[in-house]
Image (tube, grey):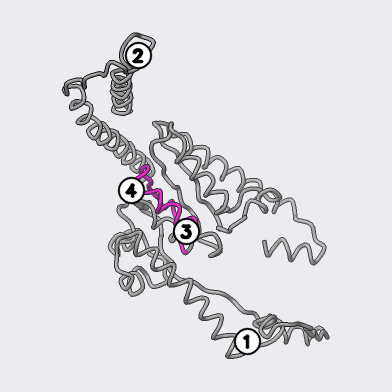
Amino acid sequence: MSGVLRRWSAGQPASPEVMAEVEAAQAARGARAKATANVGGGIAVLSLYGVMSQRASMVDDISGAGGTSTQAFTQSLRAALADDSISGIIIDIDSPGGSVFGTAELAAEIMSARGTKPIYGFVNSLCASAAYWTGSQCEQLFITPGGQAGSIGVYMQHVDESAALDAEGYKVNYISAGKYKVEGNSLGPLDDEALSFLQSQVNSYYQSFTSAVAKGRGAPVASVRDGMGQGRCLLAADALAAGMVDGICTMDDVIKKMQKAIKGTAGARADDVALPVAAEIQAPAAPVAADDPVAPSGAPAAHAARAAARRRALELAGL
């Protein structure tokens, strides 16, 4: 994006070579997403690729899909959870992270969906910063042998452009209301008070990040802060040793694990329903009062209701 802005400011169009690279990258991303989406077996694969931002879809409309909108991804996740034909979800992750805006909300959606359907994350092949915040909330998180995960940390940047402006002969003045309205602007140095405030914001986001990872990975917050790379990305084996992932494998392996989980969930659901069904079938029918209404088939309404309940329970057991 910064390259595009520099070309625009200089009045230079993108060269044919640049456009060829953009088109090739778009085609590769599209083919990859299509290949992983069609796994069948009631499994939905949701792609979390590229830089994450809350509304990246606005850029995608102009430049093609080069990132992930956390807002759009949340909608896709909700749709998959609501779809009865989908029994399990795999989040295919290849992202350096991105903005904190929208990340905590997406992570919370994944955490709250645990238990509804199996949700696995797959690092394929980078899961850093905001992407790891998101991936750590999955029921299980796996990583490709050549992958990296981590970068648990938060930062913001301040650039003092005053010297460059002076060299160009510019002098800028702000006319503002509100004590801190122009605090931290890029046209001057960062004073101690502004630095302290910005650091407090970074610390707050870091607290939220590490707390979410600790909850998602079932680890103490101290072990997240003092281990798990301390802001570094770790290779697959090191990430596994640090408890950041649950296994090193391929996408095919993750799909097999998900298929097994789906079967296990269906079996557990059948077991849960089987006992009340058997008990209801064996129980003697309750006496029917003389004034009980009669169903169209001629059976008392109470008996018809019990029969309908048994049919529904058997249908659930067969899902």
Against 309, residue 118 (above or below) is: below
User: Are circles 1 and 3 on residues that touch, CB within 8 Å?
Assistant: no
* Dot in front, 2 or 3: 2
Where, by quadrant of the figure, is residue 219 drawn?
A: bottom left
Is residue 126 found inside the magenta-colored segment of the image?
yes
**Label 1, label 2: how far apart the Cα atoms are:** 82 Å
Pick the front one: 162 or 31: 162
Q: Which residue is mark 3?
A: 131
Q: Residues within 10 Å of mark 2 (few under 14, many from 20)?
A: few
Sequence-first disc among 4 and 3: 3
Amino acid type indicated by mark 4: Cys
| Residue 121 drawn above or below residue 193 | above
Residue 168 in magenta stretch: no
Mark carried by residue 249: 4
Answer with left or right where residue 130 lies relative to residue 229: right
The amino acid at mark 2 is Val
Residue pushed farthest bottom? Answer: 192
Q: Which residues are magenta?
A: 105-129
Q: Nearer the viewer, mark 1 or mark 2?
A: 2
Q: Position of residue 44 (x, y in %)?
A: 45, 38
C-alpha gap between disc 4 and disc 2: 60 Å
Residue 73 appears left or right of 307: right
